[in-house]
Amino acid sequence: MIGRCRSVVLTGLMGHVIDVEAHVARGLPAFAIVGLPDASLAEAKDRVRAAVASSGVEWPRHRITVNLSPASLPKSGSATDLAIAVAVLAAAGVVDAGLARELVLLGELGLDGRVRPVRGVLPAIAAAVQAGAARAVVPAGNAREAALVAGAQVEGAIALASVLGALGAEATAESLEPVPAPAMRVQRAVARDLADVRGQPLARHALEVAAAGGHHLLMVGPPGAGKTMLAERLPGILPDLDDAEAVRVTAVHSLAGTFDAGAGLMRRPPLEAPHHTASSAAIVGGGSGLARPGAVSLAHAGVLLLDEAPEFPTRVLDTLRQPLERGEIVLHRAHGATRYPARFQLVMAANPCPCGMFAGTGEGCSCTALARRRYLGRLSGPLLDRVDIRVEVGAAARADQPGEPTARVAARVREARDAARERLAPHGWTLAGEATGPWLRRATSRTACAGLWRAVERGALTARGFDRSLRLAWTLCDLEGAASPGVEHITQALALREGAAS
């Protein structure tokens, strides 16, 4: 006899609904799982057998074969434990095979029969609903997360015995408490207001322009000038995520184990600030088997802050070039390619030299000219060419006064984004930073572009820099409420782009 139910495996954020088939035949007792399982999934044999015994159900003493279909798809993790147990007992006639066939089951089994939470439940249930399989059983610790998916009919399971009982088996178990989801590494919202930063009008303006157009930003200045404070306040002036982006961002954090389902979907742009000792795998994602998401994906639709950017290894910094251009990262491993979203705003903060004191006349700086060049030279030309705004942040002064609060700046950013969305919606874009070069060149007058062409001719601007300067000019135009950029907007864009060129 063959028992069937369904489960979901993830390749990156892409969920695949699989059929879990179990065949119970005469022969010496044996248990085999086929269909490209990884080591953790192959070990399900021992977990499932012990969990079934702990649930008061006799394990079939026959030759058992479990097939995970499609067999050509690599499968990893322990989320299919519950489905394997139900399929085997359906094949043995212990539970109603017809009821089992209608369910999608997710969950890791403990040896005592508890159903333990797993990562990535939100994208898994979303994939199941999209495939037309809305009825799902998930661990009780993941139930709130799964319920965030529209159209899903979710039931939370504390123990395998309760699932088997609902499917017609005579299962018994001790009174078990639900296993809570593991403690998540969640970045709690901290009240960070731009009014906390004194002075720095140029850097504030650059931050507002970056937020309005989705531009990347580099701030160079001495220690204590306020670079990090400004960067940490960028997410506060960005608008809330729309429904589609909120689900996508939440799915990434669910897979990474950094999502608290109690707070609902993530509606605010995330901020990721990895330490400068982070590896390439920590930044862009990696790991053996199928790669896990890195900081660039956790910062999707938000901000990736690289504080003390020149202290990062050049090799690590240059891994950002592909996601900055494409808005996604594709990681190839022996078991296949994994694709994660990575459309973020890059903000880099840097000192002007190793000692940090070179500013203005250079008084108090102990670094040689060669040391200064080498220090900022760690930010490669191709990476800097993708950074739209570069500003120098001067040292703070006693006379500096608090600037505008976050709420007032956020309102202007929202108005500018609304204007850009209305203009760019027919082309499928929402921000000036997303518009393509050909459209920008057609939409901008030749007179306004004359200054950019001169910069290209004298070698001060690359072809990529030309397009990025145009995007910057359109953002400045949106902030001012103008219909199209003029010469003054192009001039401002060039000034912002070349402000802290190394």
Image: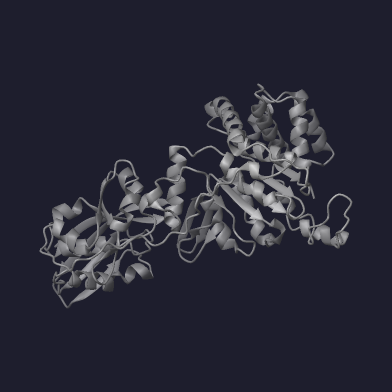
Q: Is residue 62 above or below residue 308?
A: below
In the image as oriented, which residue stretches furthest toward the top? 483
Q: Which is more toward the observer, 391 or 377? A: 391
Asked where in the image residue 162 lies, by quadrant, the reply is bottom left
Q: Which is more toward the observer, 296 or 302? A: 302
Asked where in the image residue 82 lies, by quadrant, the reply is bottom left
Quadrant (top left, top right, bottom left, bottom right) of the N terminus? bottom left
Residue at (74% x, 42% y) in the render: 200
Residue at (39% x, 46% y) in the render: 264
Q: Is residue 462 visible?
A: no
Q: How is the image coloured?
A: one colour
Horizontal and vertical percent for residue 114?
A: 25, 66
Locate residue 371 relative to residue 120 in the image: left or right. Answer: right
Horizontal and vertical percent for residue 265?
A: 41, 45
Count of numbered circles in the view: 0
Horizontal and vertical percent for residue 217?
A: 68, 45
Locate residue 184 relative to residue 285 in the image: left or right. Answer: left
Q: Is residue 67 visible?
A: yes
Q: Which is more toward the observer, 385 or 346? A: 346
Q: Is residue 452 above or below residue 501?
A: above
In the image as oriented, which residue stretches furthest toward the bottom? 28
Horizontal and vertical percent for residue 150?
A: 33, 41
